[in-house]
Image (cartoon, grey):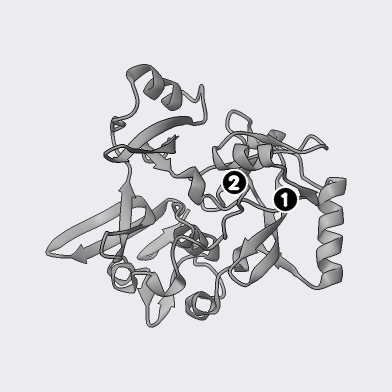
Amino acid sequence: MKHNNLMNQFKDNELPLGELEKLGLYIQGRILLSRDNINALLTGRRTEMTNFRDLKFDGLSIPELDAKLSLKKDQDGTVSLNVHPIYKVAKSHELLDENESQKLQNGEIDNIAKDQEVQKGKVRKIIIEYDEQTKEFISYDPEKVSVPLKVNSETLNEEQIDQFKTGQIVELSDGTKFQHTALNPQGIRSDNKRLALSVLFDAGISYLVYKGIQALKNRAAKFQNEGFTNGYNQAVADMKQKGELKDSNVTIQQLIDKHTPNQESRGYGRSSSR
């Protein structure tokens, strides 16, 4: 089964710097977003919730706005920003009935697969999730999901690859559980706070360590395992020996490194992640 390249949805030179500048996120040649959030944009996911203040553009003045960001590509290839504010009431999704909508909103299910007609006679599967922060249903194409080759030294089989793409919980032989999600910048949840992944990039296979991973839904973060499993420790040892250990926060290409500040701003200025 095909493993998708981790950076396959958007290129670094496609980032809409003009729109980022209007939001106060691109100043004097520097992108004021964390590497995790930039990586989320490039891989087609959403950023963290971000607080914007004193926005002025297109004749509009907004004193304060909390929103997530994502990228979209128009039919002509133009890439622009999507802004996802917090809605007072959840907007309905055309492919969901009332029962399905309620189950997602109540957290009874993590996601649901649906067939979507993209053109006459052509259907594709999409996965729908519910963003509790913005009160919004979002969907993604499982065939565009970047699947790790290995997690904690264990090669994923075809069933596990399919489970990951479709947002199902994947379980390793040592009991470690994780799943893909489009709702957070890392694109993953787990019952462990850290995972070691080998992934496919444009330049080949790379090795990443993810830390501070979001807990699986309906599982309080305080009950997460620290994640120092035998498989994790072995993977990290192998990566160090090969000199290929990288933190997941520094997996973006050189242009992004050039534009990104060394330390993420934590105070509320024009904008800040939270």
Q: Secondary structure at mark 2?
A: strand
Estimate the spatial distance between the alpha carbons at disc 1 and disc 2, rounded to whole Å.
10 Å
Question: Residue at image x 26%, y 64%?
Answer: 76
In the image, residue 272 sits, relative to residue 132, either above or below, namely: below
Q: Is residue 33 above or below residue 162?
A: below
Q: Amino acid at mark 2?
A: Ile
Q: Quadrant of residue 139?
A: top left
Q: Can you see residue 183? A: no
Q: Nearer the viewer, residue 212 or 110?
A: 110
176 horizontally vs 269: left or right:
right
**Up-down relation of residue 159 to residue 156 (above or below):** above
Nearer to the camera, 144 or 228: 144
Which percent across, then down, holds residue 38? 48, 64
Q: Which residue is mark 2?
A: 188
Residue 224 in view (yes/no) = yes
- Total number of numbered discs in the rendering: 2
Where does residue 44 sit, x and y in percent of width and height? 45, 55
Question: x%, y% of residue 244?
Answer: 76, 70
Measured as percent of width and height from the top left, residue 158 is found at: 68, 41
Where does label 1 land, which residue?
Answer: 195
Q: Residues within 10 Å of mark 1 (few under 14, many from 20)?
A: many
Q: Residue at x 44, y 21 (%)?
A: 103
Task: Mark 1 or mark 2: name the one nearer the start of the chain.
Answer: 2
**Which mark, residue 187?**
none
Is there a contact, CB below 8 Å, between mark 1 and mark 2? yes
- Residue ID at (60%, 51%): 2
State left or right for residue 124 relative to residue 22: right
